[in-house]
């Protein structure tokens, strides 16, 4: 059985279907369909996929920044589980819509400032000034799409870089 475009890349399929429906509406048809709204709804399905990828990228960035910058003596198992879970979900979305993988660097660049702001607010609310200071080095470094996706990479506890695994029982920071 041959995979259709729908099976290979859902976002591209939605874009093409919306375009085809708009073209059919312009050319006229005797089918009693609401062409314009059908095209808009199908196009919105693709936009929903893109928005989900953006949201997952944001959540991964927040977790990376919290793990890499928090002055807490233990990173919180929830942050580690959350990071892994969001990465798995993002991989699934990108598998369904490979076009979005090619857009991921731009998505990460767009979401990174918002993630920095979110984490800074959390640190401010909890009085973690050391975490705010550490965010500055991550702000300069940034995070790549490749790092965002790699299930084996975690933020270093000493400097703004990624390491192959996270030692959840880290020592207290000085």
Image (cartoon, rainbow, N blue to C red):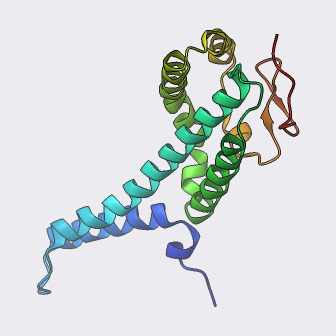
Q: Is residue 40 above or below residue 51?
A: below
Q: Is residue 87 above or below residue 71?
A: below
Residue 96, horizontal then vertical, whole percent: 57, 65
Left or right relative to 2: residue 120: left
Q: Is residue 95 above or below residue 174?
A: below
The residue lying at 65 percent from left, 13 percent from top is 140
Name which quarter of the figure residue 2 lies in: bottom right
Residue 172, horizontal then vertical, whole percent: 82, 20
Quadrant of the frame with the C terminus: top right
Left or right relative to 60: residue 165: right
Comparing 101 with 130, the one in front is 130
The residue lying at 72 percent from left, 40 percent from top is 146
Name which quarter of the figure residue 42 lies in: bottom left
Q: Is residue 158 above or below residue 163?
A: above
Comparing 19 with 113, the one in front is 113
Comparing 127 with 140, the one in front is 127
Residue 149, horizontal then vertical, whole percent: 70, 46
Left or right relative to 49: residue 100: right
């Amino acid at each position: 059985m041959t995979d259709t475009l729908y099976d290979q890349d859902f976002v591209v399929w939605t874009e093409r279907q919306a375009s085809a429906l708009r073209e059919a509406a312009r050319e006229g048809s005797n089918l009693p369909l609401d062409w314009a709204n059908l095209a808009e709804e199908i196009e919105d399905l693709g936009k929903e996929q893109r928005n989900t990828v953006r949201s997952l990228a944001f959540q991964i960035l927040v977790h990376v920044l919290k793990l890499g910058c928090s002055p807490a003596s233990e990173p919180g198992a929830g942050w580690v589980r959350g990071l892994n879970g969001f990465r798995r979900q993002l991989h699934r979305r990108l598998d369904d819509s490979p076009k979005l993988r090619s857009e991921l660097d731009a998505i990460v660049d767009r979401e990174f400032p918002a993630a920095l702001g979110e984490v800074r607010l959390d640190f401010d609310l909890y009085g973690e000034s050391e975490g705010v200071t550490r965010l500055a080095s991550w702000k300069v470094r940034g995070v790549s799409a490749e790092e965002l996706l790699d299930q084996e990479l975690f933020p270093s506890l000493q400097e703004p870089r990624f390491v192959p695994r996270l030692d959840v029982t880290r020592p207290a920071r000085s």
